[in-house]
């Protein structure tokens, strides 16, 4: 995944600071270190979570921006340098299956009681391996200068030949996880039965003009009207809208959109475990999640979170109403089969 120059510089500076500090000190003294993606995600974690937490508790949390926190967790296995980090739910599942995450009891993270258990990253015996702070969703982003939103009321519209050379698409690693899953549901199947979804994906691929290799590139494709529409992330469209690009809209088709939970986890063997548990418990609470929504459009996971009138207007309703329109698949199954699914998609694309 590529990032902007600003994000790359921030990641490099964070990595330099990490390497210059003795590893025995990184996770044993000083602030808690939280590994985050760069750009808007890092800003959200600084302003909505870390700074308020320091003000309330006196414990400093430093947000370190990285291209891929999961890769750092794997590289530092056995000698973790970060206390917590963010990842997709699939990344969390894979780390958990590889026995690379610290687990916690509900008594250590009691705010998880206010998050629906189907959104928990947990072990088979019920231990908490990750906290879900919020969701985004995967819908269809439309440049309304190029096409009306009504033209994409169904995911099936993406396979309509009328959109030949008018659509954008992401890479197979994400097609396997997101696009194929929601297209399979649209075709009457699900993540376990993807035959119909693969046909819809093939139809969409035939209409694609550009494959975006980074979120920044995909933003540009939509903003400049290089493509009329593409499957995309709600929070990215939120950011475009907040920046004044109001002609790009996110659509939840009639079949629903894909719910994308994120996870915050701690590496196995993390130091200052009690402090980490307190930080995770704070992340699971309603107030910082509400601030995250206001800043970036994320949907809180905590059921006690309240939407202001302004937020409801932007999201199109209450949090519960929005969640009811989103599909939550079996992310564990998707993670387990991702390698084979990517290979099948690569093979399909090679035939076009």
Image (cartoon, grey):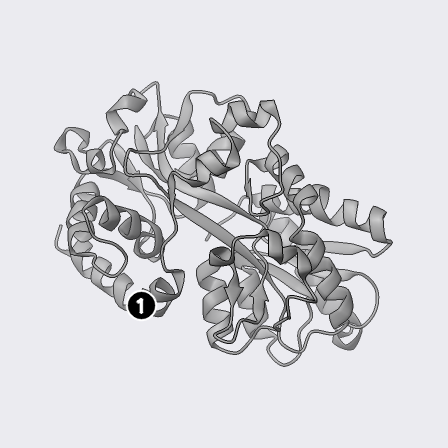
The residue that appears at 52% across and 67% down in the rendered structure is 122
Give left or right: position of 137 versus 187. right
Out of 17 and 236, give the one closest to the viewer.
236
- Residue at left offset 46%, top offset 32%: 237
Position above or below: 240 against 339:
above
Dot 1, crowdedness within 10 Å: few (<14), some or many (≥20)?
some
- On the image, the x and y values in percent for residue 30 come to 83, 64
Q: Which residue is mark 1?
A: 337
Q: Residue furthest right?
A: 58
**Left or right of 127 in this view: 144:** left
Is residue 265 placed above or below 44 in the rendered structure?
A: below
Q: How many marks?
A: 1
Q: Quadrant of residue 288?
A: top right
Residue 141, above or below 348? above
Question: Residue 43, how many percent across, how many down?
Answer: 66, 42
Q: Is residue 39 visible?
A: no
Left or right position of 233 against 297? left
Q: Residue at x 68, y 60 (%)?
A: 110
- Would residue 300 be seen by someone viewing this image from the given angle? yes
Toward the viewer: 53 or 329?
A: 329
| Kind of element beneath mark 1 | loop
Which residue appears at 60% of the width and 51% of the height?
114
* Residue 86 image position (x, y, % from top left): 58, 57
Q: Quadrant of residue 325?
A: top left
Question: Where does the image place residue 279, in percent across and percent down from the top left?
Answer: 73, 58
């Amino acid at each position: 995944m590529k990032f902007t120059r600003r994000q790359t510089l921030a990641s490099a500076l964070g990595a330099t600071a990490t390497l210059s500090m003795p590893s025995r000190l990184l996770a044993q003294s000083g602030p808690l270190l939280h590994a985050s993606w760069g750009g808007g995600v890092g800003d959200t974690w600084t302003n909505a979570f870390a700074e308020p937490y320091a003000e309330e508790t006196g414990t400093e949390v430093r947000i370190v921006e990285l291209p891929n926190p999961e890769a750092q967790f794997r590289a530092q296995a056995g000698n973790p340098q970060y206390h917590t980090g963010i990842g997709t739910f699939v990344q969390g599942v894979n780390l958990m299956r590889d026995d690379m995450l610290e687990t916690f009891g509900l008594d250590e993270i009691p705010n998880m009681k206010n998050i629906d258990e189907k959104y928990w990253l947990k072990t088979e015996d019920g231990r908490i391996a990750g906290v879900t702070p919020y969701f985004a969703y995967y819908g269809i982003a439309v440049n309304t200068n190029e096409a009306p939103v009504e033209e994409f009321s169904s995911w099936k519209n993406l396979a309509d030949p009328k959109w030949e050379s008018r659509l954008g698409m992401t890479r197979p690693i994400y097609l396997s996880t997101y696009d194929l899953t929601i297209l399979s549901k649209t075709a009457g199947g699900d993540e376990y039965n993807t035959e119909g979804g693969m046909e819809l994906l093939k139809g969409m691929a035939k209409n694609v003009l550009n494959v975006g290799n980074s979120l920044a590139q995909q933003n540009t494709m939509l903003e400049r009207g290089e493509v009329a529409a593409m499957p995309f992330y709600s929070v990215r469209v939120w950011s475009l809208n907040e920046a004044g690009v109001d002609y790009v809209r996110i659509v939840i088709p009639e079949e629903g959109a894909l719910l994308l939970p994120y996870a915050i986890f701690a590496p196995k063997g993390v130091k200052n475990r009690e402090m980490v548990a307190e930080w995770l418990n704070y992340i699971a609470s309603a107030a910082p999640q509400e601030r995250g929504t206001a800043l970036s459009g994320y949907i809180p996971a905590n059921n006690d979170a309240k939407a202001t009138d302004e937020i409801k207007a932007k999201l199109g309703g209450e949090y519960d109403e929005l969640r009811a329109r989103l599909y939550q698949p079996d992310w564990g199954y998707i993670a387990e089969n991702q390698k084979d699914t990517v290979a099948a998609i690569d093979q399909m694309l090679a035939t076009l």
